Amino acid sequence: MDATPPRMNPFDTSPEAGHLPLCPWRRAAHEGDYVAVDHSFQAYEQFKNSLSGDPFGTGWLFVFKGPSGSGKTALMHRCASWVRRLGETSGAFQAEIIDFTDQVPPAFEALPVARRVEFVARRVALRVSEFLGRKVGSGPPDLVYAAMSDLLLAQDEEDRRLVVVLLPPSELAAELQHYRYLGRPGIVFMAETSTDEADAAATLTSRYGLLAVPLELRTLDPEDGWKLVRKRLPDGGDPAFPRSLVDSYMAAMAGGGISIKQLRSVLAGAYQVARARAHTTVSEEDLLDSYLGGAT
């Protein structure tokens, strides 16, 4: 019996493949899977530059904006991971990451905005109480976050904690508006949205000095397709993708735009079809048959 495990599809976008969303603060190996496409590299550098000084000097709200499938959640996780490493390498603080990106009940999306904000505040308060060993009082979210900030800033320097809250995805500008007024020193909010209504984040600050920073991801540039292929198939692959095929596909999609998730899905399908046909090189027919749902 052949015990050789099947080759993994390097473009597979399914959760079972362990590729999406990337989360290096849980799995360190994911850090090497990021590709400098969809403008995420620029957004990542902007994030690091914002927090490279004293992250406790103010509250923060980072708004990750971009179309569906553009990698917002994966970039949020990468930024959270960088904050954790910053604390570890500097010895100045320990980052406590509280992740709501996939950790809310099914009924959460149907809740009114105020209830959603209250739910998150209660859960964050519970976590902060656990790792500080001191109870955070209950009450309206603004008082809860104020109490948390006071506790965090009162910690001895050798045990200082920075709380990084990855908020649930939201298309509600009113929800982001709440967080602009809830931020306090010691707390970093990260939010993702596909709506353009969040543009005001670029200019708004709250009465408590919170800084709102928009970080934008967009659809792929034509050359990003080949960057992704070279990252996933550094040795050429078997089957291999010819650059001319990738470039022509990206050129064809340039008008409407394509997200990294969409591109990976197309490449995964073409790779699978070519492999089933025992092709050593992915052909245009393989790509088209996969894209159109043709038989292998």
Image (tube, grey):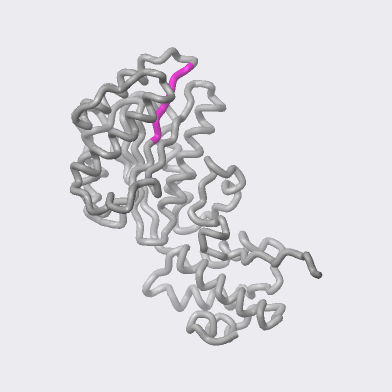
| Quadrant, the N terminus | bottom right
* Residue in the image at 24% along x and 40% along y: 117
* Residue in the image at 33% along x and 49% along y: 105
Q: In the figure, is residue 205 to the left or right of 3?
A: left
Q: Which residues are magenta?
A: 159-164
Q: Is residue 21 above or below residue 131?
A: below
Q: Position of residue 228 (x, y in %)?
A: 56, 62
> Which residue of the protein is positioned furthest toward the front in this rendering?
1
Q: Position of residue 63 (x, y in %)?
A: 32, 45
Q: Is residue 14 above or below residue 180?
A: below
| Quadrant, the C terminus | bottom right
Q: Position of residue 132 (x, y in %)?
A: 41, 20
> Which residue of the protein is positioned furthest toward the right in this rendering?
1
User: On the image, which quarter does residue 155 sit in?
Assistant: top left
Q: Is 296 a magenta residue? A: no
* Residue in the image at 54% along x and 27% along y: 88
Q: Position of residue 274 (x, y in %)?
A: 64, 79
Main secondary structure along the magenta-highlighted residues: strand
Q: Is residue 155 above or below residue 74?
A: above
* Residue in the image at 34% along x and 41% along y: 62
Q: In the figure, is residue 258 to the left or right of 240?
A: left
Q: How many marks?
A: 0
Q: In the figure, is residue 43 to the left or right of 232?
A: left
